[in-house]
Image (tube, rainbow, N blue to C red):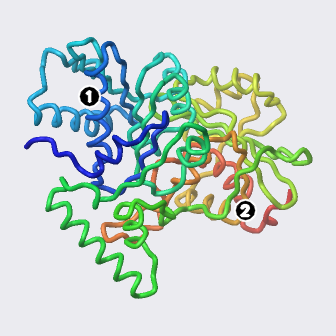
Amino acid sequence: MSFQVTTSLKKMLAMKARKKVVQGATSSGKTYGIIPIIYDKCIANPRIKATVVAETLPAVKEGAVDIFKNFMMDEGRWNDNQWNATELCYTAQNGSKLQFKSFDSVGKAKSSGKRDILFLNEGNHIPYPIADALMIRSREIWVDFNADSEFWAHTEVLTQENSEFLKLTYKDNEAIPIETLEDLMNRKKRAEAEEARGEKGYWWNWWQVYGMGEIGNLQGAVFNGWHIVDDIPKHARLIGYGLDYGYTNDPAALIAIYYADNQFYFDELIYQTGLLNKGISDHMIRLGVTRYDTITADSAEQKSNEDLRVLGWRVLDAKKGADSIRFGIGIMQELEINITKSSTNLIDEFRRYTWSVDRDGGSTNKPIDKYNHGIDAIRYHFQTNMADPEAPRFAF
């Protein structure tokens, strides 16, 4: 099947700004259009370096790489000799390179060097510090996503000069498979049925995001009504820290917790993969954490907790039980929550942390086990230090 020039492709080709932000519904053809656009720029200009980035390596391989290969094979342009499967890099005959990558730390993003073109595929799944480190080293930038909630593309990129926004839906993609269109129309009917009943539930929100390409309310969000603030108030009192361990795929997260005027303030201090316990300790010294401060940490990591105690830190094992997650979340939902604007990873978690749903779209009353490293660190503090149901609530 040959490549089809769609309305989506034509609209994206007309974008001229350095930072191109494409918000699209499912099957709108955004990724299927951006990758060919980038590759054609590679073959039109010698020694171009273009990088396609997704959240994880599997996401890169199963998404952007497959799309690129199918496009090239459909057009009869694929050459096995030009593809490095180990490096996930295709080298054109003029020396231009199209590489596919993922980054799990800001350091790795910085060390990847400069490039001519950057494509952040499903950018809402990529933490802003990593995205920012890549964007500042790129001449031309593309970002695409399904807008299940507002994120850094809206609040950071589109507020800058030389940026441009485009919204696409399935109606812009004449190449949409008939089976996919049929499934979309079934979901549209469910959304319309909910609205007719006076409801705006799971399917209504799903259709807004994935059918119409609108910014959704992230149906089932665990936390609502929290705020982003510039700084911690000067009169706020530090009441402790929460610590969640991580290493290879998950970051270690240290969150400072403050209290003032019946409100709580959270400040992200550490959010990094690859940290050993000694590294966490070194970071805390540099950040000004004192040996008198209480750090409530994951009790499942007894060895790590003991390592930090040996290094002189006052570490409290988080209290856990059969329903500790739900209990901790319940306490946090009662709080007036403020998050510092510099806490970019924590903000991203609060935006994306939802209750899991069953196959019919109903809530399971259990949160998803992702986007929760900083949230878990905070939860450890509250479920441990306020575990006594008879204790006065929030008396600090």
* Residue 43 on image: x %, y %: 25, 21
* Residue 137 on image: x %, y %: 52, 22
User: Callout 2: few (<14), some (14-19), or many (20+) C-alpha neighbours within 10 Å?
Assistant: some
Amino acid under disc 1: Asp
CA distance separating discs 1 and 2: 52 Å
Residue 298 visible in image: no
| Residue 95 figure quarter | top left
> In this view, which residue lies farthest toward the bottom?
197
> Could you tell me if the residues under marks 1 and 2 are in contact, i.e. CB atoms within 8 Å?
no
Give the mark, 1 or 2, whose residue is nearer the N terminus: 1
Residue 161 visible in image: yes
Amino acid under disc 2: Leu
The quadrant of the picture occupied by the C terminus is bottom right
Which residue, given by chain and number where applicable, does mark 1 sit on?
A: 40
> In this view, which residue lies farthest toward the right?
235
* Residue 369 on image: x %, y %: 46, 50
> Camera-side residue: 169 or 62?
169
- SS of the residue under disc 2: loop
Res. 175 mark = none
> Camera-side residue: 248 or 182?
182
User: Callout 1: few (<14), some (14-19), or many (20+) C-alpha neighbours within 10 Å?
Assistant: few
Mark in the foreground, 1 or 2: 1
| Image point (42%, 47%), residue name | 22
